[in-house]
Image (cartoon, rainbow, N blue to C red):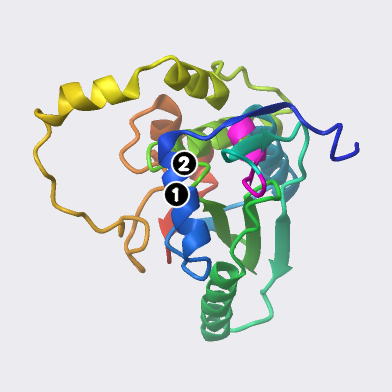
Amino acid sequence: MSKAGNIEAIYPLSPMQEGILFHALYTPQSAGYFEQFSYTLEGDLNVPAFEQAWQTIVARHPILRTLFTWEKRNQPLQIVRQEVTVPFAYQDWRSYSPSEQQSRLEAFLIADRKQGFDLSKAPLLRLALMRLSERRYQFTWSFHHLLLDGWSSPIILAELFALYEGFLRAESPALPPRRPYRDYIRWLQQQDLSHLLREHRGHLAPLPLLRRAAHRHAGQALTPFGDASTSAARRLLTPGAGAADRHRWTSLSC
């Protein structure tokens, strides 16, 4: 499919996205909006099913197929591709010692951050899976903050594992419908934001600046669902049930 024909939708950015885009363009060498999750996965991973689940997630969520354009325009726009191929890198590191694997992983994570993203090309995410032993893998998911916030990533991962479990059973799980991001943009366009700002300005006390470090605590044990309490998350994280027998997630470096 040609680039001209591979367009599903075009619409403006939200005010938050405009701010992120401005700062990303103003400081192109900064990794402040580069999100990187890296997890150790232990179990009998079906790699083709895992990759298929990710491709299905991207096909399901338009924001994950979105690029951004701003040059020679009165306002920046986001363009949703109808189809994209998710970059999925696989490497077999079983021949390396644990210390060599750790060194290679640290070098990979640094290089991945330095690579960044071309905001004018979709998808603004990529995946990497390194096999460490017969039943141990290191998985890294990188994406730009223009696409997702901290509330969205647990939803993506919960859906991912629901799809993965279904594909293992040769089934297509019925996931709840999700409204596309353009519906939110359309709603914003119908609001009088200046009026809302004036109305709430007097009710909002100044808040202290909080470091965005929740995703970057190296060595801290975390689940990929954060505080999610969905049934999918509970099933996956409970020993002896569902995928928990096959997979255990811990955070190595985020």
Above or below: residue 163 compared with residue 114: above
Question: At 35% from the left edge and 53% from the top edge, which residue is drawn?
Answer: 222
Describe residue 253's horizontal placement relative to residue 180 as left or right.
left
Q: Which residue is pictured at 38% across the width and 33% down the height?
A: 234
Q: Position of residue 125 (x, y in %)?
A: 62, 51
Amino acid type at circle 1 is Ile
| Figure quadrant of the N terminus | top right
> Is disc 2 placed on a helix, strand or loop?
helix
Task: Point out residue 174 in the picture as x, y percentages from the top left corner.
Answer: 61, 17
Q: Are marks 2 and 1 in contact (CB under 8 Å)?
A: yes
Stretch in magenta: 62-72
Q: Nearer the viewer, residue 144 or 75?
A: 75
Q: Nearer the viewer, residue 106 or 248?
A: 106
70 inside magenta stretch = yes
Circle 1 — which element? Answer: helix
Q: Position of residue 223 (x, y in %)?
A: 38, 48
Placement of the C terminus among the 4 image quadrants: bottom left
Using the rendered view, name the quadrant where residue 164 is placed: top right
Give the numbered dot on residue 20: 1
Task: Quote the CA–CA distance across marks 2 and 1.
Answer: 5 Å
User: Is residue 38 visible in this depiction of the protein?
Assistant: no
**Image point (53%, 75%), residue name:** 110
Residue 177: quadrant of the picture: top right
Q: What residue do we see at 47% from left, 66% from top?
A: 27
Question: Quick check: 230 above or below 208?
Answer: above
Disc on res. 17: 2
The number of callouts visible is 2
Q: Is 194 part of what is drawn in magenta?
A: no
Q: Residues within 10 Å of mark 2 (few under 14, many from 20)?
A: some
The kind of residue tagged 2 is Gln
Front residue of 34/226: it is 34
